[in-house]
Image (cartoon, rainbow, N blue to C red):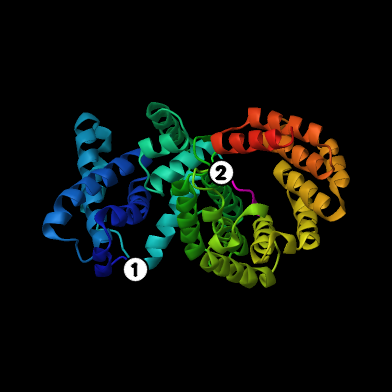
Amino acid sequence: MSVTAQSSDLPIGHLLRELTPQVLGTVVRRFRDFAAAEDAVQEASIVAVTQWPRDGVPENPRAWLTQVALRKMVDHIRSESARKRRETEVVEEAAGAPEPALDASSQEDDTLVLLLMCCHPALTSASAIALTLRAVGGLTTAEIAYAFLVPEATMAQRISRAKQTIKASGIPFQLPTDEERGERLRSVLHVLYLIFNEGYTASSGSHLRRADLSQEAIRLTRIVRGLQPNNTEVAGLLALMLLTDARRLARTGSNDELIPLAQQDRALWDRGQIGEGVALLSAALPKGLVGPYQLQAAIAAVHDEAARAEDTDWPQILALYELLKRMSDNPLVILNHAIATAMVHGPEKGLDLLDKLKDLRIAEHHRMDAVRAHLLEMAGDAEAAAKYYRVAAGKTANLPERNYLLMQAARLT
């Protein structure tokens, strides 16, 4: 959607969330001060919240917000220059320069640059996720803290440290070179993937999922897709999210209890999202080198296209995991490969693979024990399966997952 007069039909809060990263990108590009630019954009948003309901949304709300934010930045620098005379030259240059161009290409570049900066490899994954949600997603610090079940003060410190890290790194606010772009974009996609996964199955808490996080990840990935329309791995990631999120309504019951894939009511799956995901994947796969997101999306598509659980093409899924395992050392990929192996060649083959999996990143994860329990149950060893279901339940901090695992254990004893 172009950000023009038609934006006036959107609620102001929604419109500001859409515009904030675009305006922030422009202001940071101009002044190269992330923290001060964010403050200026926030102040401009406050002015908008006050004036727009009374005076109406401007014909070009992005230009309006950008102009106000730039003035706030100039005021900030002038205030600082009164105390620090060394800023005078910068203030005069900023105050006298024309407003930045607001053409579509500039808008898109600024959004992409902001994503690339938030997801810079210098930041930890936790900091990159928090900063992305704050600067690009438009979530408040309180919302992000709630999503990750930490105090707001803790999350504020994490975001502040991330900004300081960016500032100390001396990284210019500009698009990376062609040589750097691939690695930086991989970081962006990885962070969006992590955000989606945390939303789809929360690592802790009383709810199985955080729909706000998974939907925000999809929204942000759509932005990247719009900016990188020919990148097949971006298309693959968006397809993976859509194909996976399509099952969300069937994943839980009336009391938010977990419903495993094989038992879900597939009539509740979102066929529109499945169709979009399959179309994205079908267009991406023939274009060249296939990456891990495309392969994961292909696996999700095989599941989604099966009318019944027993119709699932497990040999095809196993073949896709064989390919994925060659290009990814993610232990969860290896774990899922063991499940696919068990579905094709029997549970004993899957258990043999689990016994060989010595990766410390997964050894203490509850999913390792949950998969072992499932395969032991398939093999007919109910006593051992119940034991591992209980072990897995003791390791997860997600209440619906824990309840499901305990119920599985109780069913076998």
Say what amino acid the circle numbered 2 marks: Thr
Which stretch appears magenta?
257-261
Whole-percent x and y of residue 223? 46, 59
Residue linked to disc 2: 201
Whole-percent x and y of residue 383? 80, 32
Q: For numbered disc 2, what is the local secondary structure?
A: loop
- Please tell me which residue is depicted at 66% across the width and 66% down the height of the picture: 307
Q: Earlier in the sequence, mark 2 or mark 1?
A: 1
- Which residue sits furthest left? 54
Residue linked to disc 1: 2
- Please tell me which residue is depicted at 51% across the width and 62% down the height of the picture: 225
Is there CB contact under 8 Å for labels 2 and 1? no
**Neighbour tally class for label 2: few under 14, some 14-19, many 20 plus, Cα within 10 Å:** some
Quarter of the image where one finds residue 335: top right
Say what amino acid the circle numbered 1 marks: Ser
- Please tell me which residue is depicted at 57% across the width and 49% down the height of the picture: 193
Quadrant of the frame with the N terminus: bottom left
Nearer to us: label 2 or label 1: 2
Whole-percent x and y of residue 192? 53, 49
Q: Does the magenta stretch include residue 267?
A: no
Residue 359 visible in image? no
Residue 372 visible in image? yes
* Count of numbered badges drawn on the protein: 2
Work out how far the residue at label 2 is from the one at label 1, CA to CA, in angstroms.
33 Å
Q: Give the overall secondary structure of the magenta segment.
A: loop
